[in-house]
Amino acid sequence: MSEGSFSRVGVVGLGTMGAGIAEVLARGGLAVVGVEINQDALERGRGHLEKSTGRAVKRGRLTEDGQREILDRIRLTTDFGDLAECDLVVEAVPERLDLKHRVFAELDKVVRDDAILATNTSSLSVTAIAAATSRPAKVVGVHFFNPAPVMKLVEVIGTVLTEDGAVDRVAALVKGLGKTPVVIGDRAGFVANRLLFGYLNDAARMLETKHASRDDIDTAMTAGGGLPMGPFTLMDLIGLDTCLEVLEAIYAETRDRRHAPAPVLRELVTAGLLGRKTGRGFYAHDAAAAEETAQDGPPPSVAIVGDEALSRAFAAAASAVGAPTAKIENADLIVASGEEADVASIEGRAKKGAVVLSDGGLTGGGALAAHKPEKDRPLVEIGLTPVTTSASADRAAELVAALGLTPVRCRARRGYIVDALRFPYINDAVTMLDAGYADADAIDAAMTLGCGYPAGPIAEIDRLGIGRALDQLEYDPDEANSAVADRLREQWDLGLTFR
Ligand SMILES: NC(=O)c1ccc[n+]([C@@H]2O[C@H](COP(=O)([O-])OP(=O)(O)OC[C@H]3O[C@@H](n4cnc5c(N)ncnc54)[C@H](O)[C@@H]3O)[C@@H](O)[C@H]2O)c1
């Protein structure tokens, strides 16, 4: 074995994560020893490995010979003693501290003294796991994402007890396996989950307070936030029990009200509605697919007033679908923005049944506030006031959809949906940067590679503008506002960007 490298690696627990990790290691040419608790579990683990590599063969990503070589490199056993010659062991048993302690105590007895012991825990303290062993200096966290063979991100966690070099050796191994390691300190949720779950919890609270519906929040974050899936689809996929567990671990450390699990999450878990795995969570997954709503008929006639972003977006959309332009008096939809938008007078001139959308905040009459968060994305957030009727909100959504745009409805409150969810998340990322346990590259890599964000939060601040972030976060320079990250204010005061 050359200095800094590993040649024989053990994996304890061959469930969802352990089997994937064993496959990744074997694909990288390492000899792997996979340990399970009993023969039945071992056979299940073998099944995971055969299925996953078999899928790769079917998809033409692996030859049958290649599959055999990978499987041949993995020795399966129920005897912890077979780990004796490993120079690294990765533990991937269920997320319970007492169980992890028992497994590490066993490893401590049988594995060579100079070997590194790693845990794949998502939310437990690596320090607490390390401290209970007789070799705390050799314990690290190595957090793979699901599915391990596919996901590029691996968080490598060192504790205050970890010896120099251990984290670097594991990070080098991860890199050699074709993954991207990010090296960070031991904080609940590490980087990706800590940032992701604050946002997911905010979304759950947004639903609970009836700011917007489940579907509108999910649509807003995909069509307007650029995410691969909305927060409720994602929580159902992760499992609501896991979401609750991770949030509780983060909240126990931060005591930040934003991490206190939203009551709706706890209610669903108590009711046994855990998401996809039980067939129902925020969504009913066994229900027939929603019917397509066909957009028939000619596009509506549109009057555009003003030249701000909202008006320009609607002018472009109307022209793209060939919607006729009309005078205010004859238009089905009137979009008014900026200084020229005297909404009260426009409403006075509009025909009965017409919808007026404006970029103002709370609109007093029948007009609806609308917000188009990104110029190259189709989302239009329609803001409802306490006096908006559901008929006019429905009609507005219908007209927006007829122009090829994606409507969602929410209360006409600061940030609507997308900004109200993304700026606290961005603020959390800057707070994390300030706390010194992850740098900007680690944070951005964690969110793009681990959670599918199109760009990391630190890169996003520069794109969206610190001013806009401070505005959304209601930063007041005359008040000590602990919610806004100090670093965000400093960068703003100095006129600096983050990258
Ligand atoms: N599932 C995910 O999406 C995910 C993602 C990242 C990290 N994690 C973390 O990975 C770890 C494993 O999660 P999972 O989803 O793979 O769980 P899992 O339940 O699918 O697999 C756990 C496996 O450990 C085995 N096991 C239990 N006790 C054992 C023992 N004493 N010795 C040997 N094997 C034992 C079980 O038989 C089972 O096969 C947890 O710490 C979890 O937090 C999970």
Image (cartoon, rainbow, N blue to C red):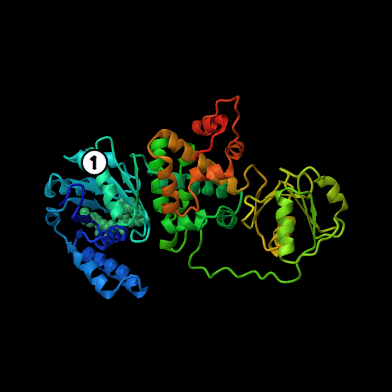
Residue ID for mark 1: 165
Asked if residue 54 lies left or right of residue 407, the reply is left
Q: Is residue 303 above or below residue 140?
A: below
Asked if residue 431 lies left or right of residue 313, the reply is left
Q: Quadrant of ligand 1?
A: bottom left
Cβ(mark 1) to ligand 1 < 8 Å? no
Label 1 sits on a secondary structure element that is loop
Residue at point 39% right, 34% down? 436
State whether residue 353 appears in this view: yes
User: Can you tell which quarter of the image residue 55 is in?
Assistant: bottom left
User: Can you tell which quarter of the image residue 327 is in?
Assistant: bottom right
Residue 489 point in image, percent of width and height: 54, 31
Residue at point 62% right, 51% down? 374
Residue 281 point in image, percent of width and height: 47, 58
The amino acid sitting under disc 1 is Gly
Q: In this view, does 466 lie above or below 411?
A: above
Residue 3 point in image, percent of width and height: 18, 47
Residue 474 point in image, percent of width and height: 60, 34
Asked if residue 76 lies left or right of residue 476, the reply is left
Asked if residue 121 lies left or right of residue 301, the reply is left
Crowdedness near tag 1: few (<14), some (14–19) or many (≥20) residues, C-alpha within 10 Å: few
Q: How many labels does the image show?
A: 1
State whether residue 389 appears in this view: no
Q: Which of 218 and 466 is in front in this view?
A: 466
